[in-house]
Amino acid sequence: MQLHLLADGIGPRPTGDLVSRAEAFCVEAPYRQPPFNMRNWGGPLHSLCSYQGKLKPSIAAFLVSWFSEPGDRVLDPMSGVGSVPLEARRQGRVGIGNDLSPLAATVSAAKLVPFDTDDVDDVLGRLTKRLDEDTPLSVLERSVDVDFGLNGPIHSYFHPETLREVLVARHFFLTEPSNGAAHDVVRSNVLHILHGNRPYALSRRSHPVTPLAPTGEFEYRSLTRQLKARIHRILPELLALISQPDGQAYQQDFRTLELESPVDAILTSPPFAKSLRFWSMNWMRLWFAGWDPIDFQTEPKRYLETEQMTSFDAYSDFARSSARLLKDGGILVMHLGETATLNMVDHIRPHLAPLFDIAFTGRECVLDTESHGLSDKGATTAHWYLFAQKC
Ligand SMILES: C[S@@+](CC[C@H](N)C(=O)[O-])C[C@H]1O[C@@H](n2cnc3c(N)ncnc32)[C@H](O)[C@@H]1O
Protein backbone atom coordinates (compact mmCIF):
# COMPACT_ATOMS: atom_id res chain seq x y z
CA MET A 1 0.00 0.00 0.00
CA GLN A 2 1.35 3.42 -0.90
CA LEU A 3 1.05 5.82 2.01
CA HIS A 4 0.84 9.57 1.67
CA LEU A 5 3.39 10.64 4.22
CA LEU A 6 5.08 13.61 2.67
CA ALA A 7 3.75 16.12 0.21
CA ASP A 8 5.58 14.46 -2.68
CA GLY A 9 6.61 16.71 -5.55
CA ILE A 10 5.89 19.96 -3.75
CA GLY A 11 9.60 20.82 -3.90
CA PRO A 12 11.53 23.41 -1.92
CA ARG A 13 10.15 26.87 -1.40
CA PRO A 14 11.23 29.47 -3.97
CA THR A 15 13.88 31.96 -2.95
CA GLY A 16 13.15 35.65 -2.59
CA ASP A 17 11.41 37.94 -0.16
CA LEU A 18 7.77 37.66 0.89
CA VAL A 19 6.55 39.97 -1.89
CA SER A 20 8.25 38.04 -4.69
CA ARG A 21 7.15 34.65 -3.29
CA ALA A 22 3.60 35.90 -2.85
CA GLU A 23 3.48 37.27 -6.37
CA ALA A 24 4.90 34.02 -7.79
CA PHE A 25 2.33 32.02 -5.79
CA CYS A 26 -0.56 34.01 -7.25
CA VAL A 27 0.80 34.11 -10.83
CA GLU A 28 1.91 30.46 -11.02
CA ALA A 29 -0.91 29.00 -8.86
CA PRO A 30 1.23 25.85 -8.40
CA TYR A 31 -1.64 23.95 -6.72
CA ARG A 32 -3.56 24.13 -9.99
CA GLN A 33 -0.87 22.28 -11.96
CA PRO A 34 -0.94 18.47 -12.44
CA PRO A 35 -0.80 16.32 -10.32
CA PHE A 36 -1.82 18.81 -7.60
CA ASN A 37 -5.10 19.63 -9.33
CA MET A 38 -6.29 16.01 -9.08
CA ARG A 39 -9.37 15.57 -6.95
CA ASN A 40 -7.81 13.12 -4.50
CA TRP A 41 -4.37 14.70 -4.34
CA GLY A 42 -3.07 14.62 -0.77
CA GLY A 43 -4.42 11.18 0.03
CA PRO A 44 -7.11 9.72 2.28
CA LEU A 45 -6.21 11.62 5.46
CA HIS A 46 -7.67 14.79 3.97
CA SER A 47 -10.91 12.80 3.70
CA LEU A 48 -10.74 11.49 7.26
CA CYS A 49 -14.07 13.25 7.73
CA SER A 50 -15.97 15.20 5.07
CA TYR A 51 -16.46 18.88 5.96
CA GLN A 52 -18.25 21.65 4.14
CA GLY A 53 -15.76 24.50 3.65
CA LYS A 54 -12.57 22.38 3.64
CA LEU A 55 -9.58 23.94 1.88
CA LYS A 56 -8.17 22.16 -1.17
CA PRO A 57 -5.26 20.05 0.19
CA SER A 58 -2.86 21.21 -2.52
CA ILE A 59 -3.48 24.88 -1.62
CA ALA A 60 -2.71 24.05 2.02
CA ALA A 61 0.42 22.13 0.97
CA PHE A 62 1.86 24.96 -1.17
CA LEU A 63 1.01 27.64 1.41
CA VAL A 64 2.96 25.64 3.99
CA SER A 65 5.86 24.97 1.62
CA TRP A 66 6.26 28.50 0.28
CA PHE A 67 5.51 30.51 3.44
CA SER A 68 7.15 28.52 6.24
CA GLU A 69 10.29 26.49 6.77
CA PRO A 70 10.97 23.01 8.20
CA GLY A 71 10.89 23.17 12.00
CA ASP A 72 8.60 26.23 12.03
CA ARG A 73 5.50 26.39 14.18
CA VAL A 74 2.56 26.90 11.81
CA LEU A 75 -0.87 27.86 13.16
CA ASP A 76 -4.30 27.91 11.56
CA PRO A 77 -6.59 29.58 14.16
CA MET A 78 -9.74 28.61 12.15
CA SER A 79 -8.46 25.27 10.96
CA GLY A 80 -11.69 23.41 10.18
CA VAL A 81 -10.71 19.76 9.81
CA GLY A 82 -7.03 20.65 9.89
CA SER A 83 -5.90 20.77 6.24
CA VAL A 84 -3.20 23.40 6.88
CA PRO A 85 -1.73 21.90 10.10
CA LEU A 86 -1.83 18.39 8.59
CA GLU A 87 0.20 19.58 5.59
CA ALA A 88 2.49 21.44 8.00
CA ARG A 89 3.10 18.23 9.96
CA ARG A 90 3.74 16.28 6.77
CA GLN A 91 6.36 18.82 5.74
CA GLY A 92 8.28 18.72 9.03
CA ARG A 93 6.67 21.74 10.70
CA VAL A 94 4.77 21.77 14.00
CA GLY A 95 1.18 21.99 12.76
CA ILE A 96 -1.20 23.71 15.19
CA GLY A 97 -4.94 23.72 14.55
CA ASN A 98 -7.71 25.55 16.37
CA ASP A 99 -11.43 25.78 15.67
CA LEU A 100 -14.48 26.71 17.70
CA SER A 101 -16.47 23.77 16.33
CA PRO A 102 -16.36 20.48 18.29
CA LEU A 103 -16.63 18.61 14.98
CA ALA A 104 -13.65 20.41 13.45
CA ALA A 105 -11.55 20.18 16.63
CA THR A 106 -12.10 16.41 16.92
CA VAL A 107 -11.04 15.72 13.35
CA SER A 108 -8.03 18.06 13.61
CA ALA A 109 -6.86 16.34 16.81
CA ALA A 110 -7.01 12.94 15.09
CA LYS A 111 -4.69 14.22 12.34
CA LEU A 112 -2.27 16.12 14.54
CA VAL A 113 -1.89 14.62 18.00
CA PRO A 114 0.07 11.38 18.47
CA PHE A 115 -1.77 8.33 19.83
CA ASP A 116 -1.19 4.68 20.61
CA THR A 117 -2.89 1.93 18.57
CA ASP A 118 -3.60 0.05 21.84
CA ASP A 119 -5.68 3.05 22.90
CA VAL A 120 -7.63 2.89 19.63
CA ASP A 121 -8.37 -0.78 20.36
CA ASP A 122 -9.37 0.19 23.89
CA VAL A 123 -11.89 2.79 22.65
CA LEU A 124 -13.25 0.35 20.06
CA GLY A 125 -13.59 -2.35 22.73
CA ARG A 126 -15.45 -0.09 25.17
CA LEU A 127 -17.72 1.23 22.40
CA THR A 128 -18.54 -2.31 21.21
CA LYS A 129 -19.37 -3.31 24.79
CA ARG A 130 -21.80 -0.38 25.07
CA LEU A 131 -23.41 -1.26 21.74
CA ASP A 132 -23.81 -4.89 22.87
CA GLU A 133 -25.59 -3.82 26.07
CA ASP A 134 -28.68 -3.60 23.92
CA THR A 135 -30.32 -0.51 25.45
CA PRO A 136 -33.67 -0.31 23.60
CA LEU A 137 -34.24 2.49 21.12
CA SER A 138 -37.35 3.61 23.04
CA VAL A 139 -35.19 4.32 26.12
CA LEU A 140 -32.55 6.22 24.13
CA GLU A 141 -35.20 8.32 22.40
CA ARG A 142 -36.26 9.71 25.78
CA SER A 143 -33.03 11.71 26.01
CA VAL A 144 -32.43 12.54 22.32
CA ASP A 145 -34.91 14.24 19.99
CA VAL A 146 -34.68 12.09 16.86
CA ASP A 147 -37.43 14.15 15.23
CA PHE A 148 -34.85 16.94 14.98
CA GLY A 149 -33.09 17.41 11.64
CA LEU A 150 -32.54 20.03 8.96
CA ASN A 151 -33.05 18.07 5.71
CA GLY A 152 -35.26 15.51 7.40
CA PRO A 153 -35.64 14.05 10.92
CA ILE A 154 -32.65 12.08 12.20
CA HIS A 155 -34.73 8.91 12.51
CA SER A 156 -35.52 9.01 8.76
CA TYR A 157 -31.83 8.46 7.89
CA PHE A 158 -31.30 5.11 9.61
CA HIS A 159 -32.69 1.62 10.00
CA PRO A 160 -34.08 1.48 13.60
CA GLU A 161 -31.28 -0.81 14.81
CA THR A 162 -28.61 1.40 13.20
CA LEU A 163 -30.30 4.43 14.76
CA ARG A 164 -30.07 2.74 18.17
CA GLU A 165 -26.35 2.19 17.63
CA VAL A 166 -25.80 5.79 16.44
CA LEU A 167 -27.50 7.11 19.61
CA VAL A 168 -25.44 4.81 21.84
CA ALA A 169 -22.22 5.90 20.08
CA ARG A 170 -23.08 9.61 20.35
CA HIS A 171 -23.71 9.22 24.08
CA PHE A 172 -20.51 7.17 24.45
CA PHE A 173 -18.28 9.86 22.91
CA LEU A 174 -19.98 12.63 24.88
CA THR A 175 -19.74 10.91 28.26
CA GLU A 176 -16.86 8.41 28.31
CA PRO A 177 -13.58 9.85 29.57
CA SER A 178 -11.30 10.51 26.60
CA ASN A 179 -7.97 8.69 26.43
CA GLY A 180 -6.55 11.45 24.22
CA ALA A 181 -6.23 11.45 20.46
CA ALA A 182 -7.23 7.76 20.14
CA HIS A 183 -10.74 8.82 21.21
CA ASP A 184 -10.68 11.51 18.46
CA VAL A 185 -9.44 8.99 15.87
CA VAL A 186 -12.34 6.61 16.51
CA ARG A 187 -14.89 9.41 16.81
CA SER A 188 -13.72 11.07 13.55
CA ASN A 189 -14.24 7.82 11.72
CA VAL A 190 -17.78 7.43 13.09
CA LEU A 191 -18.44 11.05 12.09
CA HIS A 192 -17.29 10.29 8.55
CA ILE A 193 -19.37 7.16 8.03
CA LEU A 194 -22.49 8.73 9.58
CA HIS A 195 -24.03 9.65 6.22
CA GLY A 196 -23.23 9.35 2.54
CA ASN A 197 -24.07 7.63 -0.68
CA ARG A 198 -21.65 4.71 -0.56
CA PRO A 199 -21.87 1.29 1.12
CA TYR A 200 -19.60 2.48 3.95
CA ALA A 201 -22.24 4.96 5.18
CA LEU A 202 -24.51 4.13 8.12
CA SER A 203 -27.38 6.19 6.72
CA ARG A 204 -29.74 5.47 3.88
CA ARG A 205 -28.59 7.04 0.62
CA SER A 206 -27.70 10.71 1.23
CA HIS A 207 -24.74 12.96 0.42
CA PRO A 208 -21.29 12.48 2.01
CA VAL A 209 -20.66 16.18 2.73
CA THR A 210 -24.15 17.47 3.53
CA PRO A 211 -26.87 15.11 4.78
CA LEU A 212 -29.40 15.80 2.05
CA ALA A 213 -32.81 14.16 2.54
CA PRO A 214 -32.30 10.38 2.48
CA THR A 215 -33.71 8.00 -0.10
CA GLY A 216 -33.77 4.20 -0.61
CA GLU A 217 -34.29 1.20 1.63
CA PHE A 218 -34.00 1.14 5.44
CA GLU A 219 -31.18 -1.39 5.59
CA TYR A 220 -29.41 -2.36 8.83
CA ARG A 221 -25.76 -1.24 8.78
CA SER A 222 -23.73 -2.42 11.76
CA LEU A 223 -21.84 0.52 13.27
CA THR A 224 -19.07 -1.70 14.63
CA ARG A 225 -18.55 -3.53 11.34
CA GLN A 226 -18.53 -0.36 9.20
CA LEU A 227 -16.34 1.47 11.72
CA LYS A 228 -13.75 -1.30 12.01
CA ALA A 229 -13.49 -1.56 8.20
CA ARG A 230 -12.98 2.19 7.95
CA ILE A 231 -10.38 2.32 10.74
CA HIS A 232 -8.52 -0.58 9.16
CA ARG A 233 -8.18 1.49 5.95
CA ILE A 234 -7.21 4.82 7.55
CA LEU A 235 -5.01 3.74 10.49
CA PRO A 236 -1.83 3.05 8.43
CA GLU A 237 -2.06 6.59 7.03
CA LEU A 238 -2.31 8.06 10.53
CA LEU A 239 0.46 5.86 11.91
CA ALA A 240 2.76 6.92 9.07
CA LEU A 241 2.73 10.42 10.60
CA ILE A 242 4.36 9.22 13.80
CA SER A 243 7.87 10.05 12.56
CA GLN A 244 6.75 13.63 11.87
CA PRO A 245 6.71 16.40 14.49
CA ASP A 246 3.78 16.20 16.90
CA GLY A 247 1.06 18.71 16.19
CA GLN A 248 -1.50 20.32 18.49
CA ALA A 249 -5.26 20.84 18.26
CA TYR A 250 -7.40 23.28 20.24
CA GLN A 251 -11.11 24.04 20.47
CA GLN A 252 -11.31 27.78 21.22
CA ASP A 253 -12.54 31.04 19.85
CA PHE A 254 -9.46 32.41 18.06
CA ARG A 255 -9.69 35.43 20.39
CA THR A 256 -8.95 33.37 23.51
CA LEU A 257 -6.37 30.97 22.07
CA GLU A 258 -3.19 30.80 24.17
CA LEU A 259 -0.05 28.93 23.06
CA GLU A 260 3.06 28.09 25.07
CA SER A 261 5.31 29.85 22.54
CA PRO A 262 4.84 32.11 19.52
CA VAL A 263 4.39 30.73 16.00
CA ASP A 264 6.40 31.51 12.87
CA ALA A 265 3.45 31.62 10.48
CA ILE A 266 -0.34 31.84 10.53
CA LEU A 267 -1.93 30.38 7.41
CA THR A 268 -5.71 30.51 7.49
CA SER A 269 -8.89 30.38 5.49
CA PRO A 270 -11.66 32.16 7.43
CA PRO A 271 -15.28 31.56 6.49
CA PHE A 272 -16.09 33.17 3.17
CA ALA A 273 -18.56 36.06 3.21
CA LYS A 274 -22.03 34.96 2.16
CA SER A 275 -20.86 31.35 2.06
CA LEU A 276 -23.45 28.67 2.66
CA ARG A 277 -24.28 28.37 6.35
CA PHE A 278 -21.79 25.90 7.75
CA TRP A 279 -24.01 24.68 10.57
CA SER A 280 -26.81 23.67 8.25
CA MET A 281 -24.42 22.09 5.74
CA ASN A 282 -22.63 20.11 8.50
CA TRP A 283 -25.68 19.68 10.75
CA MET A 284 -25.74 15.94 11.35
CA ARG A 285 -22.05 15.72 12.20
CA LEU A 286 -22.38 18.76 14.51
CA TRP A 287 -25.31 17.02 16.19
CA PHE A 288 -23.26 13.83 16.61
CA ALA A 289 -20.32 15.89 17.93
CA GLY A 290 -22.56 17.27 20.69
CA TRP A 291 -24.85 20.03 19.45
CA ASP A 292 -28.42 19.63 20.69
CA PRO A 293 -31.33 21.10 18.69
CA ILE A 294 -31.27 24.30 20.78
CA ASP A 295 -27.57 24.81 19.95
CA PHE A 296 -28.46 25.29 16.29
CA GLN A 297 -30.23 28.49 17.37
CA THR A 298 -27.65 29.80 19.84
CA GLU A 299 -24.18 28.53 18.80
CA PRO A 300 -23.95 30.01 15.26
CA LYS A 301 -23.93 33.55 16.76
CA ARG A 302 -20.48 32.83 18.19
CA TYR A 303 -19.00 32.05 14.78
CA LEU A 304 -17.35 34.44 12.34
CA GLU A 305 -19.69 33.21 9.59
CA THR A 306 -22.52 34.97 11.45
CA GLU A 307 -20.57 37.95 12.77
CA GLN A 308 -19.34 38.96 9.32
CA MET A 309 -22.87 39.00 7.91
CA THR A 310 -23.33 42.38 9.59
CA SER A 311 -19.79 43.69 10.11
CA PHE A 312 -16.13 42.80 9.60
CA ASP A 313 -15.13 44.39 12.92
CA ALA A 314 -14.29 40.95 14.33
CA TYR A 315 -11.16 41.10 12.16
CA SER A 316 -9.73 43.74 14.54
CA ASP A 317 -9.86 41.02 17.21
CA PHE A 318 -8.41 38.59 14.68
CA ALA A 319 -5.52 40.98 13.96
CA ARG A 320 -4.83 41.49 17.68
CA SER A 321 -4.87 37.79 18.53
CA SER A 322 -2.76 36.91 15.46
CA ALA A 323 -0.20 39.57 16.37
CA ARG A 324 -0.13 38.24 19.94
CA LEU A 325 0.49 34.65 18.79
CA LEU A 326 3.02 35.43 16.03
CA LYS A 327 6.74 36.01 16.41
CA ASP A 328 8.01 39.46 15.44
CA GLY A 329 8.35 39.45 11.67
CA GLY A 330 6.11 36.37 11.44
CA ILE A 331 4.00 35.82 8.34
CA LEU A 332 0.21 35.88 8.04
CA VAL A 333 -1.44 34.47 4.90
CA MET A 334 -5.21 34.58 4.47
CA HIS A 335 -7.26 32.76 1.83
CA LEU A 336 -10.37 34.88 1.26
CA GLY A 337 -13.45 35.04 -0.93
CA GLU A 338 -15.02 37.60 -3.23
CA THR A 339 -18.66 37.64 -4.27
CA ALA A 340 -20.35 39.72 -6.98
CA THR A 341 -20.94 42.50 -4.44
CA LEU A 342 -18.27 42.11 -1.75
CA ASN A 343 -14.52 41.59 -1.64
CA MET A 344 -13.36 40.39 1.79
CA VAL A 345 -9.89 41.84 1.22
CA ASP A 346 -11.28 45.40 1.10
CA HIS A 347 -13.14 44.87 4.37
CA ILE A 348 -10.36 43.09 6.25
CA ARG A 349 -7.38 45.19 5.16
CA PRO A 350 -8.14 48.21 7.43
CA HIS A 351 -8.42 45.94 10.48
CA LEU A 352 -4.98 44.39 9.87
CA ALA A 353 -3.19 47.60 8.92
CA PRO A 354 -2.13 48.86 12.35
CA LEU A 355 -0.42 45.61 13.32
CA PHE A 356 0.63 44.11 9.98
CA ASP A 357 2.40 45.27 6.82
CA ILE A 358 0.37 43.98 3.91
CA ALA A 359 2.96 42.76 1.43
CA PHE A 360 0.79 41.53 -1.44
CA THR A 361 -2.75 40.58 -2.40
CA GLY A 362 -3.62 38.40 -5.38
CA ARG A 363 -6.91 37.36 -7.01
CA GLU A 364 -7.88 34.05 -8.58
CA CYS A 365 -11.12 33.60 -10.51
CA VAL A 366 -12.81 30.35 -9.45
CA LEU A 367 -15.86 30.35 -11.70
CA ASP A 368 -14.33 27.45 -13.66
CA THR A 369 -13.54 25.15 -10.71
CA GLU A 370 -15.43 21.94 -9.99
CA SER A 371 -17.97 21.82 -7.20
CA HIS A 372 -17.85 18.10 -6.28
CA GLY A 373 -21.49 17.60 -7.28
CA LEU A 374 -22.75 20.03 -4.65
CA SER A 375 -22.38 23.78 -4.73
CA ASP A 376 -19.65 24.32 -2.14
CA LYS A 377 -18.65 27.77 -3.32
CA GLY A 378 -21.83 29.55 -2.20
CA ALA A 379 -21.83 33.01 -3.73
CA THR A 380 -18.03 33.07 -4.15
CA THR A 381 -16.77 34.18 -7.57
CA ALA A 382 -13.06 34.64 -6.82
CA HIS A 383 -10.47 33.69 -4.23
CA TRP A 384 -7.94 36.14 -2.85
CA TYR A 385 -4.66 35.59 -1.06
CA LEU A 386 -3.51 38.26 1.39
CA PHE A 387 0.13 38.11 2.50
CA ALA A 388 1.21 40.18 5.51
CA GLN A 389 4.02 40.42 8.02
CA LYS A 390 3.78 41.36 11.67
CA CYS A 391 5.13 44.90 12.10
C1 LIG B 1 -13.57 27.95 5.82
S1 LIG B 1 -13.56 27.04 7.33
C2 LIG B 1 -11.87 26.52 7.45
C3 LIG B 1 -11.63 25.27 6.68
C4 LIG B 1 -10.26 24.70 6.88
N1 LIG B 1 -9.24 25.50 6.22
C5 LIG B 1 -10.23 23.25 6.39
O1 LIG B 1 -9.52 22.96 5.43
O2 LIG B 1 -10.99 22.43 6.92
C6 LIG B 1 -13.63 28.30 8.55
C7 LIG B 1 -13.63 27.76 9.97
O3 LIG B 1 -13.67 28.86 10.87
C8 LIG B 1 -14.23 28.36 12.08
N2 LIG B 1 -14.57 29.50 12.93
C9 LIG B 1 -15.56 30.43 12.75
N3 LIG B 1 -15.55 31.32 13.75
C10 LIG B 1 -14.54 30.97 14.58
C11 LIG B 1 -14.02 31.53 15.79
N4 LIG B 1 -14.56 32.63 16.32
N5 LIG B 1 -12.96 30.91 16.37
C12 LIG B 1 -12.41 29.79 15.83
N6 LIG B 1 -12.88 29.21 14.70
C13 LIG B 1 -13.92 29.79 14.07
C14 LIG B 1 -15.41 27.55 11.58
O4 LIG B 1 -15.85 26.61 12.54
C15 LIG B 1 -14.84 26.89 10.32
O5 LIG B 1 -14.40 25.58 10.57
Image (tube, rainbow, N blue to C red):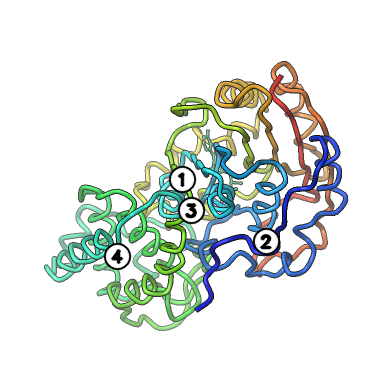
Image position, residue 246 (x, y; %): 44, 47
Look at label 1 and name its amino acid. Answer: Gly
Image position, residue 42 (x, y; %): 61, 64
Apparent side of residue 157 relative to residue 24 in the rendered image (left or right)? left
Separation (CA) of disc 1 from disc 4:
30 Å
Dividing the picture into quadrants, the one containing residue 144 is: bottom left
The label on residue 244 is 3
Separation (CA) of disc 2 from disc 4:
28 Å
Task: Mark 2: give few (<14), some (14-19) or many (20+) Cα within 10 Å.
Answer: few
Q: Which residue is mark 4?
A: 166
Give whichever of 190, 358 is nearer the camera. 358
Separation (CA) of disc 1 from disc 2:
32 Å
Precedes in sequence: disc 3 or disc 2: 3
Q: Nearer the viewer, mark 1 or mark 2?
A: 1
Separation (CA) of disc 1 from disc 3:
9 Å
- Secondary structure beneath disc 1? loop
Apparent side of residue 274 relative to residue 364 in the rendered image (left or right)? left
Look at label 2 and name its amino acid. Answer: Ser
Dividing the picture into quadrants, the one containing residue 124 is: bottom left
Separation (CA) of disc 4 from disc 3:
34 Å
Look at label 3 and name its amino acid. Answer: Gln
- Secondary structure beneath disc 2? loop
Q: Which residue is mark 1?
A: 247
Image position, residue 108 (x, y; %): 46, 50
Q: Which residue is mark 2?
A: 375
Separation (CA) of disc 3 from disc 2:
35 Å
Compared to 250, does 351 lie above or below? above
Residue beneath the point at 51% across and 48% down: 279
Q: Nearer the viewer, mark 4 or mark 3?
A: 3
